[in-house]
Image (cartoon, rainbow, N blue to C red):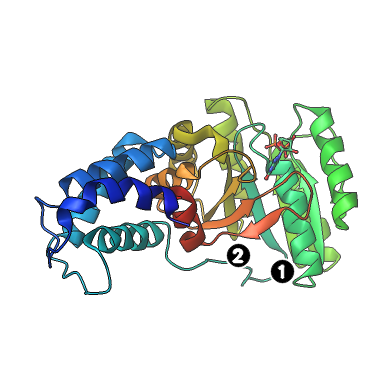
């Protein structure tokens, strides 16, 4: 899986052959290749710099065991560090609260919030046997409410209707009340997103958050955004106490660099990956697999 990076490194590590220990000197060229691989995977430059510094710190002084070449030893360090930086093990949803467990979906328009809401609803219903309600607070695009209704139907979850003349906070409160009275386990709150970071949108979602006090606030971000994901992630992380990230559109050409950048900027666990337009296209996020994808 690490073929690309391994091939890249093969060129430069010839000079390392026979050395029993990784040193600052002998890994320099190899680190340059790692840096290139990460930049090609669309990891943001400041993140790459930090990362390389970390790898250097970990790698220098490493004894090279006899079954490995020094290059392989370095790739091993890089892979482990990438995995660690993306959270190590998979982190699941936290639903440990008095029902309904409220999940607030945040992110820019087009990131995949509504689709992911449906995917999560389906996963929670089918795999975890939860009773799930969903509501849209997107009063700016009537089509968005209709889209969620369609998605909810396909996902087999209940849809709480809303209309553009209502206030988002009122819609959310009514949905919470309904969910409570009808013994729903989970309420998924879909929100409006703009095309770019916008103060009004941020204030609105902050008010929603303060009102419904969700146990999970998931930031949904398009992996294809690559480096641009950094600014979006920073803005949402500053505005809201995010509890996790969903990286969408990983079925496309995205090399996954956004995963590392978003994790680096927010420090929040990447919980799920969107891997298709269909509602079955949601996977638990596994840092180890993403590390292989970024390096591969
Ligand atoms: P929202 O504006 O954030 O609610 O975004 P939508 O849920 O409407 O998604 C925007 C577009 O991205 C739609 O065409 C979705 O089908 C597509 N989409 C969402 N998630 C994925 C994914 O994981 N993979 C792919 N290929 N497309 C996705």
Q: The residue tagged with tag 1: helix, strand or loop?
A: loop
Q: Give the numbered dot on residue 133.
A: none
Q: In 3D space, how far apart are the residues under numbered discs 1 and 2 (Cα atoms)?
A: 14 Å
Q: Is mark 2 within 8 Å of ligand 1?
A: no
Q: Earlier in the sequence, mark 1 or mark 2?
A: 2
Number of callouts: 2
Residue 194 in percent (x, y) is at 63, 27
Residue depth check, mark 1 versus mark 2: number of the one nearer the observer: 2
Near mark 2 (Cα within 10 A), the count class, few <14, some 14-19 or many ≥20, is: some
Residue 229 in percent (x, y) is at 48, 36
Q: Give the numbered dot on residue 93.
A: 2
Q: Is residue 147 visible?
A: yes
Near mark 1 (Cα within 10 A), the count class, few <14, some 14-19 or many ≥20, is: some
Q: Which residue is mark 1?
A: 99
Q: Of 258 and 188, which appears nearest the observer?
A: 258
Residue 182 in percent (x, y) is at 86, 65
Q: Residue at x 39, y 44 (%)?
A: 265
The answer to whether 270 appears left or right of 105 in the picture is left
Q: Is residue 137 above or below residue 4?
A: above
């Amino acid at each position: 899986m690490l073929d690309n990076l391994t091939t890249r490194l093969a060129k430069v590590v010839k000079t390392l052959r026979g050395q029993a220990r990784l040193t600052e000197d002998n890994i320099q060229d190899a680190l340059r290749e790692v840096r290139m691989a990460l930049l090609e995977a669309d990891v943001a430059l400041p993140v790459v710099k930090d990362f390389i510094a970390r790898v250097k710190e970990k790698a220098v002084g490493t004894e090279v065991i006899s079954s490995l070449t020094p290059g392989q030893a370095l790739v091993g360090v890089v892979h482990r560090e990438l995995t660690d930086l993306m959270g190590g093990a998979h982190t699941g949803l936290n639903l440990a609260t008095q029902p309904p467990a409220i999940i607030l979906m945040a992110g820019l328009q087009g990131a995949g919030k509504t689709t992911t809401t449906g995917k999560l609803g389906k996963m929670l219903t089918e795999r975890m046997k939860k009773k799930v309600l969903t509501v849209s607070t997107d009063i700016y695009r009537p089509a968005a409410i209709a889209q969620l209704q369609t998605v909810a139907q396909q996902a087999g979850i209940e849809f709480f209707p809303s209309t553009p003349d209502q206030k988002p906070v009122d819609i959310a409160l009514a949905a919470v009340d309904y969910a409570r009275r009808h013994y729903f386990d989970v309420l998924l709150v879909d929100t409006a997103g703009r095309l770019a970071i916008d103060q009004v949108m941020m204030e609105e979602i902050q008010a929603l958050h303060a009102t419904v006090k969700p146990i999970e606030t998931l930031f949904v971000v398009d992996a294809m955004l690559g480096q641009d994901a950094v600014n979006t992630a920073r803005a949402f992380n500053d505005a809201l106490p995010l509890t996790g990230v969903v990286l969408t559109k990983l079925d496309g050409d995205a090399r996954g660099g956004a995963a590392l950048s978003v994790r680096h900027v927010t420090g929040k666990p990447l919980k799920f990956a969107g891997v298709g337009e269909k509602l079955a296209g949601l996977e638990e996020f596994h840092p180890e697999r993403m590390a292989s994808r970024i390096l591969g």
